[in-house]
Image: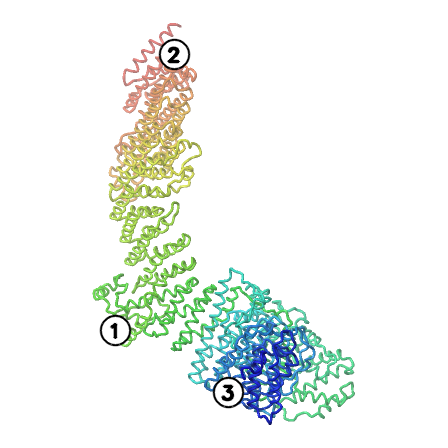
Amino acid sequence: MSMSLGGSSRAGRVLGPSLDKIIKNVAWRKHSQLVAACKSVLDKLETLSDSSDPNSSSPVFGLSLSDAEFVLQPLLLALDSGSAKVMEPALECSFKLYSLGLIRGVTDGKGMIEAVCKSACTGDDAVDLAVLKALLSAVRSSCVYIRGECLVHIVKTCYNVYLGSVSGTNQICAKAVLAQIMLIVFARMEEDSMEVSIRTVSVNELLEFTDRNLNEGNSIQIVQSFIYEVMEASEGNASPVVEVPRAASKGDGKTEVDNGEVENGTESSGESVIREDGFLIFKNLCKLSMKFSSQEQSDDLILLRGKILSLELLKVVMNNGGPIWRTNERFLGAIKQFLCLSLLKNSALSVMTIFQLLCSIFMSLLSKYRSGLKEEIGIFFPMLILRVLENVLQPSFLQKMTVLNILEKMSHDSHIIIDIFVNYDCDVNAPNIFERNICRTVNGLLKTALGPPSGSTTTLSPFQDLTFRLESVKCLVSIIKSMGAWMDQQLIIGDFSTPKSSESEISTENHAIINGEEGTIPDYELHPETNSGLSDAAAFEQRRAYKIEFQKGISLFNRKPSKGIEFLISSKKIGGSPEEVASFLKNTAGLNETVIGDYLGEREDFSLKVMHAYVDSFNFEAMDFGEAIRFFLRGFRLPGEAQKIDRIMEKFAERYCKCNLNSFKSADTAYVLAYSVIMLNTDAHNNMVKDKMTKADFIRNNRGIDDGKDLPEEYLGALYDNIVKNEIKMNADSSVPQNKQANSFNKLLGLDGIFNLVNWKQTEEKPLGANGLLIKDIQEQFKAKSGKSESVYYAVTDVAILRFMVEACWGPMLAAFSVTLDQSDDKVATSQCLQGIRHAVHVTAVMGMQTQRDAFVTTVAKFTFLHCVADMKQKNVDAVKAIISIAIEDGNYLQEAWEHILTCLSRFEHLQLLGEGAPTDASFFTTSNIEADEKTHKSAGYPSLKRKGTLQNPAVVAVVRGGSYDSTTLAVNTSNLVTSEQMNNFILNLNLLDQIGSFELNHIFALSQRLNSEAIVAFVKALCKVSMSELQSPTDPRVFSLTKIVEIAHYNMNRIRLVWSRIWNVLSDFFVSVGLSENLSVAIFVMDSLRQLAMKFLEREELANYNFQNEFLRPFVIVMQKSNSTEIRELIVRCISQMVLSRVNNVKSGWKSVFMVFTAAAADERKNIVLLAFETMEKIVREYFPYITETETTIFTDCVRCLITFTNSRFNSDVSLNAIAFLRFCAVKLAEGGLVCNESSEEGDLCSAPVDNDASDGQLFTDREDHASYWIPLLTGLSKLTSDPRSAIRKSSLEVLFNILKDHGHLFSRTFWAGVFSLVVFPIFNFVSDNEGADSNNDEVLQASRPPHPDVSAWDSETSAVAAQCLVDLFISFFNVVRSQLLAVVSILTGFISSPAQASASTGVTKLVRLADDLGSRLSEDEWKTIFIVLKEVTVSTLPRFSKVITIMDGMEVPEVSQASPDLETLSDSGLNNNDIGDDTLQTASYVVSRMKSHIAMQLLIIQVATDIYKIRTQSFSAYIIKILIEIFSTIASHAHQLNSEKMLLMKLQKACSILEISEPPVVHFENESYQNYLNFLQHLIMDNSSVAEELNLEQQLVGICEKILQIYLNCTGVHNPSQKQSSQPVLHWILPLGSAQKEEMAARTSIAVSALQVLGSLGTDSFSKYISQFFPLLVDLVRCEHSSGDIQRVLCYIFQSCIGPIIMKL
């Protein structure tokens, strides 16, 4: 029968069994009506079926309205029966009806819901559970919508079950049902829909703070299953969802909340019904949480449990709130108006559970709703967090743990910390929560970590104290970790735009939580409008700087008000008018009220104006006098000085009367009454006053003050009562005294009122009482500030803001971590500290905060205790691990901090070696001071210290004794040996270090290849610095870092060129510095390490025209050039030789450094180094020459320079000669390769890349073709070798040079030849021009003893001849190309002629004549002119210089023979005496004689050259050239005659020659030869070229020369000059016999005289007749003078017979 109970309808199938069970369980007699109703309904159900109208208004699905009411009637009767057996099936049936969606529609509480609620609290646990089940299913059903009053009734019923049930399971279930109802209601409210996904509440999370004691065995599991059953039963029913009205009706009127309290209902505000009801529930929950016990029922624990339950439900609501709470102004306002008020009122309670709940709710507000609660969070943060942390002496364990937990949770959301700084510390009108509160929080954490001050006691147990410290450190770590996480997130997404999610895209599905730990959505993401306020860090920092300066002014004002006002005005923080200053005093938080009063009472003009403006800013209209004065004095404290009070009260009275014209007859009345009120307030509320003023006294004291009349007694009495009952005080006056420092700080923050509230410790039973006004005032502050523009909430994404945050908090954090590390040995605490330091390093390093980063790194580095191993503990080993982690994780940002890390790694490796017993690096770097000791240690070795701890080794002793962190070396003092205990501790600590293997150590260096470009350079710099410190240790040099340098260079060799170049710049300087070290072993090791690197580097191929190989090998060059160590230089040569010969295929730009090294080796003072380098150089040139020239031209230049340097080697001439041969070999290779300048490049294509550095050279070679740069250095190098002092080298270089030019000159262009002559050929003969100029500065006598020019002495006659021969041959061979150089070539040859060396002069004559002869007809007229002009210039230019030489003898007297000492050495050794002067004269005369002989020889050679050249082409010279030749002959002849006429000079020289026993200069011979050649030239010219002779009238010149010669001869014979004037009287001529000297001279001149006479005699008849009148007197004188031979007479005879006779005969 039971199977068919209820009929075919869905409702019937549920109702039938339940009604049948009711009939069975009910007492028929007592509930007959119920039985009858049940039977009737069962009968009715048999006839009913489901209706086909789904939109029916029936409350039961499938039934009509009348049928629905009929079938539900038995359930209502059963629920009202009071019998548990009856109510249970009825409640079960109700649950099924709701869960299956069979009951539907909108209900306001009448009917089924009301009946279920009434059936609760019967005392039967099963019934209560059934009620909860039914109510939850009703609320969960999407087919039924329960309106506000009914919903409140359901909540109330669940409250009653929770509070009234005895069963712990039922209480837990009631709480869970309430929480689930909150989730359902507010989830629907969020979506404004009945169809939402709802999360099932977690019972275990609900019991986080309370009711854990209610768990009866497995109650939690039972309740959780209960909730799941109800929630799952309602899933998936096919009934249609109820349609909810969209607008709230106005008929809700009033809603009963609890205990008869009536709350004004929610009139429609345009919200939907669902949201209206949610708002109503939220408001009533807040009201319930604010209910306090009355004084009559002070021990109302039920009320307290209800308060706690309300707060728990509010926590659930806030934790699961969605965007509606932030976007909807009404709901956000509800949080501010109701929830924040609840937090304020409950914050003063000392119940731990309430405090925990408040903190949890506050955390939800902070994490999810902070954008809309800016002002409120600024109040609650210090109220809930700060005050607990700073209470060190009397802390509450649970309170403090709760706060630490909240801070840790807060730090998990990295945006919270950032937002706090941006919106509070950067807002002028907000408190400095981060800088002041967070930093004070950090200080509080530090205080907690450090414990109470010494001498103080604490209520905490040791375990609690340790827990506090650990949690404090964890919190600090969480904060810095959060900052780092935010930074990392912003840096990752910094290059991408974060998409903004619309509100519709945010779903609340599966996001409902209890504790807010999962599924939370960042506040700013749910508020896209806040993103519009984004600003960069610079703008926020500017605002923060403004705020800091503004607060500085406030602080200054509180100390010195006038100074503070001046500062604020000068910094433009406030205006300068009295009105603006008064507004500042009135409205600015943080000002000291007492100081304000003192400032307002000052009598200075400006202060007085400010006080007047301050009082005038008040509006006292329609205010009672007592109310007005109370309102006036709430902003400042009256000063203690009577005059100041008088001024303030006087102005107040004036203002009050002005606002209330009919209040008093005059302002005097108000003034006196104000004074009386102040006195009354002090008298009534000062405990020191024993005899209080009565009302009668007050009235009597104020008689006659109203212009002689009395004020009404009723008025004065009411004023008296008001003052006595309610003290006049400032807003900030506290009922609890605070210390001065804290009070001033709180005032500056504007937090004094908050602490007044939270410091008043009321118990849970008392109402808020006296603090109601304070709470009201805080609420008013919320409302006032919420309207300000500064209340806009900002979100920032610029990581630069983090820099300012770190600057504010890094100091306290570093102190907390450092102190904890130092004082605590707890593994967890020290681990947390090290983790915190790691995060701090990460943040400061990435942000580029060098000081802060280095501080943290230095701290952990010092704490490794690697510098003091004997004191090491496990925490120090952990610090080493932290150092390694920092290096691996943040290596890209460590920069200079790498030095600390690498120093630690170096010390760690040192300890590892000592522990393993390996010999120290110092054993390889012996020094003279401890050589014997080290040799002993080398032979014995270091036994493993881990096996034997008694070894007193200096290195070990130094490490065991330890030192400071900053000490780079440990002094070895073997006299102070360590004890065995110290050694054992040291060995034990070394065992601790075994936790860190070599892999971790080497991993850092291996990972260097992952560092970015900036980081790797910083890493290398630091490593080089550490290595330098290791190697420079005088007692214990080490190579650990040096080997790592080689490793990291190898690891990073594949980096891009730009980065690797920067790395190598650092390494290069390091290798050079260490390579020049005084410690030879260190330098050798470094050079060998550099060789290893170079070998690896040369494995890489280099493209042409790059220069990095050269840069890489440059350290070898610098050390080779600067090192004073023979061993180092030899090692470098060997290294370079090995590298080049083994990697010759890959060497490109490196050739330059290779040749520079060999060049330095070639100039070395050690023969073995020179020979070793040349051996390699020989192989390079012979076998690998093509590799040299395949890259760039300058490398070949370096090769040539290197070979030339070898030619200068003084150790082995074979090396020099071979080097010259290699130069010729290079030239042949160049020619074969075709690397030449083509003939086609004529003008403007001059070759480039000169080898010399002279600017003049650089201007000569500018050819666009690069081939010339090969030839020029080679040729110029050989050219310079021609001046080598060694004859073999000079000759060889000359031959090779000119052979190269002759063999390959055909490849050179005309312009290139010009360059070759200018830079290569002509510099060879610079000694010629130098020789000419060497005699130009001989004005002083002392210069007479100067030796010949070095260049001249270096060249012997043979070399000169070879050079001149080569020059002439080259010039003749390529005359057509180089004819433009004729002038220079001729100048060089004439320079030879003018040389004092006879051989060189002869060479010059020979080569110049040959040049003219070989060229012959190839020379043009102009070129011939050039040759002769040069000869003429040489002739003329030598005369002035020679004249200066002979003038030296002017004024000097040559001593007689008897006066002169033949022993010149005796003269020089005898000291200063009279003979010194004679000695100097003889030296000077000797010099003049020598110069005169050279000069005469040169002049004669010039005559010879001119004559020889003329003979080559006698007929082809023009008149101009003939004229030049005549001038040459004439000049020399005239000069010879002039020289011979210097009789005094010649006599001096004759004396000197006689004394010095040297031959006299051949002056007479010079004159004779010059005239003889002159005569011969003119005679031949007249005979050979008559036309030119006639044109130039040479015959007359010839006759004149003959006359000159005859006259000179006659002068020699002593005959007077016929030109002398003859007297009219006869003169008797005495013919005196000639002396021997005259006879000799006459004999010498006879030949020239004979030649002159022969020339005259050879003249034609006409010519002889023409000129006879000129020379006839001379002939007559010749007849009558004495002759040395008969030649003159014979010629004269011929002339007279053959020439003169015919003329006479014709007469």
Q: Can you tell which quarter of the image residue 1278 is in?
A: top left
Q: Amino acid at mark 1?
A: Gly
Q: Quadrant of the C terminus?
A: top left
Residue depth check, mark 1 versus mark 2: number of the one nearer the observer: 1
Q: Where residue 1598 sits in the image (x, y, percent)?
A: 38, 17
**Residue 1147 position in % (x across, y down):** 33, 47
Asked whether the beta carbons under mark 1 and mark 3 sit within 8 Å of each other, the answer is no
Q: N-terminal of the two: label 3 or label 2?
A: 3
Pointers 1 and 2 in contact (C-beta within 8 Å): no
> Exactly how many numbered labels are in the figure?
3
Residue wearing tag 2: 1664
- Mark 3 residue crowding within 10 angstroms, few (<14) / some (14–19) / many (20+): some
Mark 1 and mark 2: span between their CA atoms? Answer: 131 Å
Residue 949's mark? Answer: 1
Residues 1673 and 1261: in front is: 1261
Whether 1501 is drawn above or below 682: the answer is above
Q: Is 1464 placed above or below 1114 here?
A: above
Q: Dot 2, how many residues are within 10 Å of its Cα: few (below 14), some (14-19), or many (20+)?
A: some
Q: Secondary structure at mark 2?
A: helix
**CA–CA distance in space, label 3 to label 2:** 171 Å
Q: Is residue 804 left or right of residue 327?
A: left
- Could you give the CA–CA distance between mark 1 and mark 3, rounded to whole angstroms? 67 Å
**Which circle marks residue 168 in the picture?**
3
Q: Secondary structure at mark 3?
A: helix
| 93 shown above or below 1083 | below
What is the three-letter code of the residue carrying label 2? Phe
Q: Earlier in the sequence, mark 1 or mark 3?
A: 3
Is residue 1637 among the parts visible in the rendering?
yes
